[in-house]
Image (tube, helix red, strand yellow):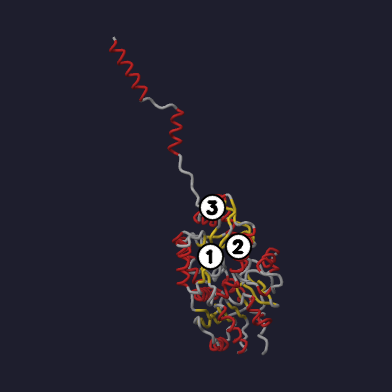
Amino acid sequence: MVLLVVVLICSLILTGCTSTPSSSTSVATSAAASATPAKTLPAKDKILIGISGPATGPQQAVRDSAFKPVYEYFVKQWNSEGGIFIKEYNKKLPIELKVYDNKSDIPTMVKQLEQLIVQDKVDYIWAPCSTADIFASAPIASKYEKVLLTMEGGATSLVGMLPTMPYVFVSLSFADWYEVPVLADLLASKGAKSAYVCYISDLHGMEYSSVAGIELGKKGINIVANKALPMEMTDFSLIIKEAKASGADAFLAFTYPFHVLPMTGQMMELDYNPKAVLFGPGANFGYYHETYKAAVNGVMCWATWNRKMSPAFDDMANKIYPPGTPEAANDWWGQSLYFGAMEFWKQAVEKTGSLDNKQLMEVMRTSHFQTVLGDTYFTNGLMAKESHPGEVGQWQNEIVEIVGGNKTTAPFIYPKPNWPKK
């Protein structure tokens, strides 16, 4: 009997030792198992942004007149407000720029961009300058998963690759997005039948000349010549004489300021007066007017805005340019898009709430924000055509009027006035 009692007691003890824990014990154990360490943020007192840009070399004139005044304005403005609010730090962080001079050299830009990301460990990168630089920098941004919001430069050659480059966002209008198609419509509407085309022998020029061959052809405009111009070329007299002899209705020069300015002067000297003249980057800048004054009237350029298009653009110009700056000093092509892109970028960073570039990329690909452009968004990495104000401009009364695009400010004048006599 005693033995039986001992066995029963031992059995009860063993059963109690192996029974299921109470519910409170189970919850506590489960919570402990599922708990993860809180995210530890690195100490942060600023947002570091890296730029490899052309402070010297042939692209300097473009950067100094285009994106640089815009980003300098915003950095100054944001920092005067304490910086950009980053939710995960629960505070505003001021901007610090780390800017390298790539001397307008693409291999140098590539090395500097990697240095900014890998060694300097910048939080964000901002764009280099020129179509070729954008093409070279896009794979680097993609490799290191850094958002690249491009500025001065096109992307015709990149469009097919953008689905595999989700970190790349193109802000500027370019050849087939949607400039040359609008130009072709304008010329055809006035009865133009032929065009002489010349272009700088780099990616920018090749993209534009290629698109022109397609879009002008759709409108029945015959391209009588398509001539590449070496970067170092300074004497354009043979090109101009050949174009003049061709009798083409339009002369289209898809090239840069260091060609555009001397070419304009030589066209005047040789009394070459086609019915339409369009120059690429250069003719859209205020220094083009400062060089030739009223003689520029009638010249066409890529352009998106002017002050009278909206109060928002008037306010934008007042912010970028010091009081008393002549209206003709504007960059009539890119600055509206760069300004809108920077407003978009800041709102996207704030919505992201962190400095994580992957999250920023996802926000930028899916969000609409109100900017100087109105409703601003990106379609497959390209700023939506609907966000472009205009596409084609023409110098009239010594300012650039928008004559083609979503919004226009004046009718297209064709034929252009002849160059003034010497």
Query: From the viewer's perspective, is 4 left or right of 217?
Result: left
The amino acid pointed to by label 2 is Val
Quadrant the C terminus occupies: bottom right
Disc marking residue 354: 3
**Is residue 312 placed above or below 300 in the rendered structure?**
above
Q: Amino acid at mark 3?
A: Ser
Q: Residue 129's x, y, as percent?
A: 53, 70
Neighbor class of circle 1 (other Cα within 10 Å; few <14, some 14-19, many 20+) is some
Residue under numbered circle 2: 75
Three-letter residue code for mark 1: Lys
Q: Quadrant of residue 401?
A: bottom right
> Nearer the observer, disc 1 or disc 3?
1
Instruction: Tell me if residue 414 can be seen.
Output: no
246 or 3, which is in the foreground?
Answer: 3
Q: Which secondary structure lies at badge 1?
A: strand
The mark lying in front, picked from 1 and 2, is: 1
Determine which residue is flagged by label 1: 98
User: For the residue labelled by badge 3, is the local secondary structure a helix, a strand or a loop?
Assistant: loop
Q: Measuring 53% from the left and 83% from the top, which residue is drawn there? A: 224
Q: Earlier in the sequence, mark 1 or mark 2?
A: 2
The residue mark sitting in front, 3 or 2, is: 2
- Residue 321 found in image quarter: bottom right
Distance between the alpha carbons at the discs numbered 1 and 2: 12 Å
Q: CA distance from mark 1 to mark 3?
A: 20 Å
